[in-house]
């Protein structure tokens, strides 16, 4: 008998219905879940789209605000840079005035010192510490003080110019960075979703180590502006000080220069008057020397003229000594002859004494002549030094308003 084939077990109809219902139910549940997911996905897409658009719009607005902030500070920096640059140029002009003023002081100072050295060449009694010497020494002190003050002020101006340039450099560097940032953010502002060169970038969502906070960013530019304002104000104050110093020093130098010139003129006049009086006295002394020489000649002649009468009287007396015996009488003739001899001898002695006095006076007059001539030469030397060497040299002094 043939072997029976094995067949799979058959399900019952109820099982078949249950199985179908299970499939229906599973399919419905799967479809329902899928529909919910589709709905949720659409809502998510819509929500994310709106969020993305809102976020991008907010970012665009913030970029615009940032651009305005950068432009504001750029304008501030530009304004301060222009002010500092102009102020530095003006201060450079003031420095040039200081340099010219300092150079202009050197020749007057040299001339004043040279005048003092020249006046040391006066001789005799004219080597006197007079008003001219006193005012010249004061003039040298004034000029030296002016030179020292101008040198210190010039150092201040150089330092202020350096500080101005430092502030200008900081402003320029800040402006350069602002311009770069403005260019970058302006480019970022122009980007849209359809811009051709947009791309993905790796590791962009991070905080750079060298980044600063908004407050630090504002403070940085604000400090640069404040420094620029401070240096500009300092520069303005220094210019005002330089103006006052140049005006005051020029006035002081003018005043002292005029005082010295007046003292020189007075001294020259005084010396000329003294020289004129000395020359007058010299002329009188010369005249008196001539008169005394004539007087001495007259005295010598008078003494010589007395030799004849003296010899006659003495010859008569000697001759009458030879009278004989009683004729050797002391009569009136004899007495008168004796008185005559004594009288002539006495008169000759008086004339000789007077001649000796005249000789002494002549020597005194000659010494006085030499002394007067020497003193006139001293005065001439002093006049040459003061009037020719010093006063003519001082005419080249040109003290201008600096």
Image: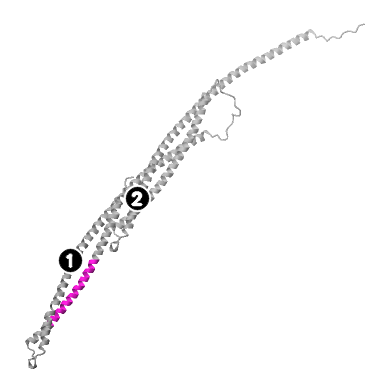
Q: Quadrant of the C terminus?
A: top left
| Res 287 label | 1
Tell me which residue sits at (17%, 68%) in the image: 290
Whether residue 263 is visible to the viewer of this picture, yes or no, is no
Tell me which residue sits at (28%, 55%) in the image: 388
**Image quadrant where residue 18 sits:** top right
To which residue does mark 2 refer?
A: 107
Part of the protein shown in magenta: 342-370
Magenta region includes residue 62: no
Q: Quadrant of the N terminus?
A: top right
Magenta region includes residue 359: yes
Q: Main secondary structure of the magenta part?
A: helix
**Image quadrant where residue 296 sits:** bottom left
Q: Residue furthest top?
A: 1
Element type at mark 1: helix
Front residue of this view, candidates 233 and 383: 383
């Amino acid at each position: 008998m043939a072997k029976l084939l094995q067949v799979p077990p058959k399900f019952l109809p109820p099982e078949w219905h249950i199985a179908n219902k299970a499939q229906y139910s599973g399919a419905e549940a799967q479809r329902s879940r899928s529909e919910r997911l589709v709905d949720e996905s659409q809502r998510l897409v819509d929500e994310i789209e709106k969020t993305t658009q809102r976020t991008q719009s907010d970012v665009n607005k913030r970029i615009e605000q940032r651009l305005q902030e950068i432009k504001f500070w750029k304008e501030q920096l530009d304004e301060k840079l222009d002010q500092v640059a102009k102020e530095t140029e003006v201060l450079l002009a003031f420095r040039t005035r200081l340099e010219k003023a300092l150079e202009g002081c050197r020749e007057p100072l040299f001339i004043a010192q040279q005048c003092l050295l020249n006046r040391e060449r006066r001789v005799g009694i004219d080597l006197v510490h007079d008003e001219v010497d006193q005012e010249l020494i004061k003039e040298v002190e004034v000029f030296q003080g002016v030179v020292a003050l101008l040198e210190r002020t010039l150092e201040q101006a150089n330092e202020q110019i350096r500080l101005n340039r430092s502030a200008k450099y900081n402003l320029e560097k800040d402006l350069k960075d602002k311009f770069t940032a403005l260019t970058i953010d302006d480019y970022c502002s122009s980007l849209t979703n359809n811009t051709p060169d947009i791309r993905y970038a790796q590791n962009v969502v991070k905080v750079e180590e060298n980044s600063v906070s908004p407050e630090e960013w504002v403070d940085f530019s604000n400090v640069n502006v404040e420094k620029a304002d401070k240096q500009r104000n300092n520069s303005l104050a220094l210019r005002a000080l330089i103006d006052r110093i140049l005006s005051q020093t020029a006035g002081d130098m003018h005043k002292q220069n005029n005082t010295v010139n007046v003292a020189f003129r007075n001294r020259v006049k005084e010396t000329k008057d003294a020289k004129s009086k000395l020359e007058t006295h010299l002329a009188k002394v010369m005249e008196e020397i001539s008169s005394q020489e004539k007087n001495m000649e007259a005295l010598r002649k008078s003494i010589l003229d007395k030799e004849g009468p003296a010899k006659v009287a003495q010859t008569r007396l000697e001759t009458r000594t030879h009278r004989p015996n009683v004729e050797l009488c002391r009569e009136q003739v004899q007495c008168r002859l004796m008185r005559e001899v004594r009288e002539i001898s006495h008169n000759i002695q008086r004339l000789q004494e007077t001649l000796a006095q005249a000789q002494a006076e002549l020597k005194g007059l000659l010494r006085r002549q030499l002394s007067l001539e020497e003193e006139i030469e001293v005065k001439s030397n002093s006049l040459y030094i003061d009037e020719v060497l010093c006063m003519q040299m001082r005419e080249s002094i040109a003290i201008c308003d600096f």
